[in-house]
């Protein structure tokens, strides 16, 4: 249900609680309708070994949900009765993880008898980036553990101008790091570990560079980088450096072409991989060349978080979007170009 008339009043005293649970992070954020973030709490599932196991991650989320919720309410210093609506990540993401967050959100909204708002996770990454940087209508490069896409607002929706044909950029870095035996250290994402090693790389090793039209492919690059190291004639630092140079150049190329096509005046870098300084530098150079403003989401809001869901939920609710409980099933492959964004019109 969409009502394009803005219906808000007294935004400061209206609060939205957002629940994020698409993958390894269970996050709860609370914002007021002016975009002030009162709290942004998260508890992340860290696998003993290997990648994210969806059912184990979901079990983690169920175990920590009440603790994270209580912490968020205490931090924000508000009572549940003060909440105006409950937002949750409705997709895209891992089924068991999404369903756990949705169950918590439904229970809260039903108990408090307040509206539920299903939020598209990818759009939330764009909206938190805009809120925190002041960007208004950017070409966005959204790169994370599960997503890699270049989007911009056009004809009433965020359109996908280019995307990965196989794995996401963050996933490429994570799988590479695990294959080469980097240890999963709490607090240091695999992508950040690759970034640190890449700083010490000196030799550029040619690897597959695959851009097809406006889309790109990273799986061949991942295999080639891993095999290069197994051959034993180059250092881990050189491979990390070369892997980053190839992968980041690919996403930068697609972003640059989207910028030239749309003639937007801003670029926004968002998602977990946005924390990477080398990627930031590449995009900044492109923005400079095109004489447009470069924006990068602050690190705190780069990875999956509840505040971005709360903020996007408040935008949607302000424009009359609510999700009836009986229609609140999760959407594992929910694309950004399927979602109405009346607040952008
Ligand atoms: P998200 O899926 O948005 O929660 O982001 C998590 C992804 O961001 C993982 O793939 C991480 O390895 C990646 N990541 C986090 N920090 C960095 C960094 N400094 N450089 C590259 N990737 C990173
Ligand atoms: Mg995550």
Image: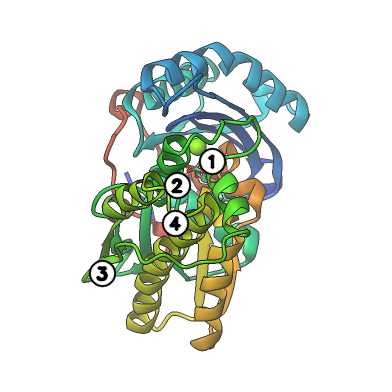
> SS for tag 4?
strand
Q: Is residue 44 above or below residue 1?
A: above
Res. 173 mark: 2
Q: CA distance from mark 3 to mark 2?
A: 21 Å
First in sequence: mark 2 vs mark 1: 2
First in sequence: mark 2 vs mark 4: 4
**From where the camera sits, is residue 166 visible?**
yes
Q: Which sits in the foreground, 225 or 158?
A: 225
Q: Which residue position holds label 3? A: 214
State yes or no: discs 4 and 3 in contact (Cβ < 8 Å).
Answer: no
> SS for tag 3?
loop
- Residue lying at 60% horizontally and 58% vertically, measured from the top left: 297
First in sequence: mark 3 vs mark 2: 2
> SS for tag 1?
helix
The image shows residue 93 at horizontal and vertical percentages of 36, 35
State yes or no: discs 2 and 1 in contact (Cβ < 8 Å).
Answer: yes
């Amino acid at each position: 249900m969409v009502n394009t008339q803005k219906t808000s009043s007294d935004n400061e005293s209206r609060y939205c609680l957002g629940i994020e649970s698409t993958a390894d992070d269970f996050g709860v954020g609370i914002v007021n309708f002016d975009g002030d973030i009162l709290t942004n709490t998260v508890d992340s599932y860290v696998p003993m070994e290997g990648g994210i196991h969806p059912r184990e991650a979901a079990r983690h989320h169920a175990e920590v949900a009440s603790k994270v919720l209580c912490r968020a309410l205490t931090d924000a210093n508000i009572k549940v009765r003060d909440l105006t609506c409950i937002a949750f990540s409705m997709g895209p993401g891992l089924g068991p993880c999404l369903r756990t967050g949705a169950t918590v959100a439904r229970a809260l909204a039903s108990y408090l008898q307040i509206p539920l708002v299903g939020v598209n996770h990818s759009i939330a990454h764009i909206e938190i980036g805009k809120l925190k940087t002041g960007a208004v209508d950017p070409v966005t490069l959204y790169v994370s553990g599960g997503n890699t896409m270049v989007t911009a607002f056009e004809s009433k929706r965020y359109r996908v101008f280019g995307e990965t044909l196989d794995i996401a950029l963050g996933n490429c870095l994570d799988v590479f790091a695990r294959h080469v035996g980097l240890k999963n250290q709490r607090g240091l994402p695999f992508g950040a570990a690759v970034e640190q090693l890449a700083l010490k790389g000196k030799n550029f090793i040619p690897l597959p560079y695959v851009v097809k039209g406006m889309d790109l492919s990273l799986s061949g690059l991942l295999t080639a980088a891993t095999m290069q190291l197994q051959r034993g004639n180059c250092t881990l630092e050189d491979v990390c450096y070369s892997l980053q140079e190839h992968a980041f150049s690919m996403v930068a190329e697609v972003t640059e072409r989207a910028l030239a096509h749309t003639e937007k005046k801003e670029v926004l870098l968002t998602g977990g991989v946005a924390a990477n300084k080398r990627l930031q530098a590449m995009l900044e150079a492109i923005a400079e060349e095109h004489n447009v403003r470069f924006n990068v989401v602050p690190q705190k809001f780069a990875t999956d978080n509840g505040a971005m869901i709360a903020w996007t939920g408040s935008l949607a609710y302000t424009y009359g979007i609510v999700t009836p409980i009986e229609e609140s099933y999760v959407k594992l492959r929910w694309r950004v170009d399927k979602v109405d964004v009346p607040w952008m019109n």
